[in-house]
Amino acid sequence: MNWTTGEKVRVRKGIAGVAGAGVLALLVTACGAGGEEAAGSGGQAGDTGSAGKPARVTALPVESTLRTAIWSSRDQKHQLKIAPERLKRGTAADLKNVQLIDDDLKDRVPYYLTVRFTNTGSTALADPTPQSNFTLTLANGSPGEAISLWNNDTLATEPPSPLPDGCEKGGPGTLEAGGTARACQLVMLPEGKPATVAYTDEAGDTLLWKVGDGKGDDNGGNLLAKDASAPTTWSDVTTKGEVPIQITRKSVRAGSLRDLRKFDLSDEQKQSVPYYVTMEYRNTGKKTLLPSMDDGVGMLSAAGIQVPPVPLIDFSAPGEGIDQCRGSIPNTRLKPKSAITLCTIHLLSKGDRPAMIAFTPQDKKAETLMWRAG
């Protein structure tokens, strides 16, 4: 997992931006009878029943609190009240008549997310599609991909198998002021138990709802407990080869934009919330290290956004960062059998929260370590 940190910046010169927007909608092509079967990992085999009926689905409990949201269309912002209404897990058999454009989706599980939205503005909405701004994420922040369907086999004598809740159809053509509509979004999620439903819009805050208890699972045993220690390696320009180290995730805490008041922030960054990730690094090898391990730290948010650390250089104080969160300190060394604590700063959109903290060693053969954020 690569965490792009951007350029180092100086006091009053601005800070590096947050990772980009959320998952884009992908397209699949629906085939007629006899179309190519899409391989997938939908868990147990689905019961397709008679022709034209969807495979069996499993309903999952999902939080359904209505929240105020913004939906953007043609550079215009529209006010909505929005919430998930129901969530169902499907199987690979659901998509047997669907040809997936992206081969990476063939190993994912289909989920059917039905959302309810009310137009709280004063004008009618044309072709509202807020459902496409929803996704699902696992406990480690891995996001699903919302996809749309179309049928390009106009000569087919039989229609493609219907998907649950009308997920092969679009939303309403118009939505009058005060009107309420429902739409279903098909989301392809990596294998695992979903933890969160997320809504993101470039003009609004992130909205989150729990799936079940909101904890998901441990990513097949690869998601460490928040206070666990784990061994890995690190190297720098002064070492030949990798040096073994032990890492402990110490804390993840929200800060305040006031902490960054001596840095120039973009308008978008002024709408974010800084989070401080503190890690302890213990040198268990026999070589001295430059304490630059915070370069390997990354974060995935509950909305599925990759959030690299924001590197700051503050010449008014020793070390990188701010007083509330200090990173690498110049002219220091991490000697064998000694430890150092370093902190990284991550900017999240309002409403979002950390889901997983990662550490990626410089050795490409070494695995990335992942901790629950909270």
Image (cartoon, helix red, strand yellow):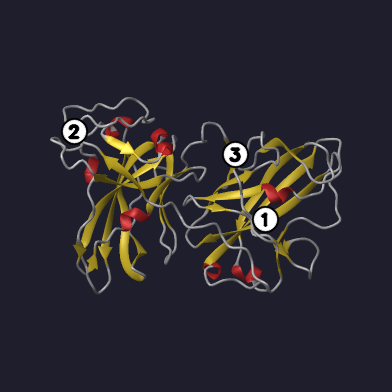
For the N terminus, the image quarter is top right
Q: CA distance from mark 2 to mark 1?
A: 51 Å
Rendering coords of residue 217 (x, y %): 48, 36
Q: Which residue is mark 2?
A: 53
Circle 1 — which element? Answer: strand
Label 3 sits on what residue type? Answer: Ala
Foreground: 350 or 52?
52
Viewer-nearest of discs 1 and 3: 1
Task: Check whether the beta carbons of the residues at disc 2 and disc 1 lie within 8 A of each other.
Answer: no
Rendering coords of residue 6 (x, y %): 64, 58
Circle 3 — which element? Answer: loop
Label 1 sits on what residue type? Answer: Thr
Q: Which residue is mark 1?
A: 344
Give the number of the disc on residue 292: none
Give the number of the disc on residue 225: 3
- Which of the 4 image quadrants contains residue 171? bottom left
Residue 369 showing in the rendered view: yes
Horizontal side of 119 relative to 223 (left or right) equals: left
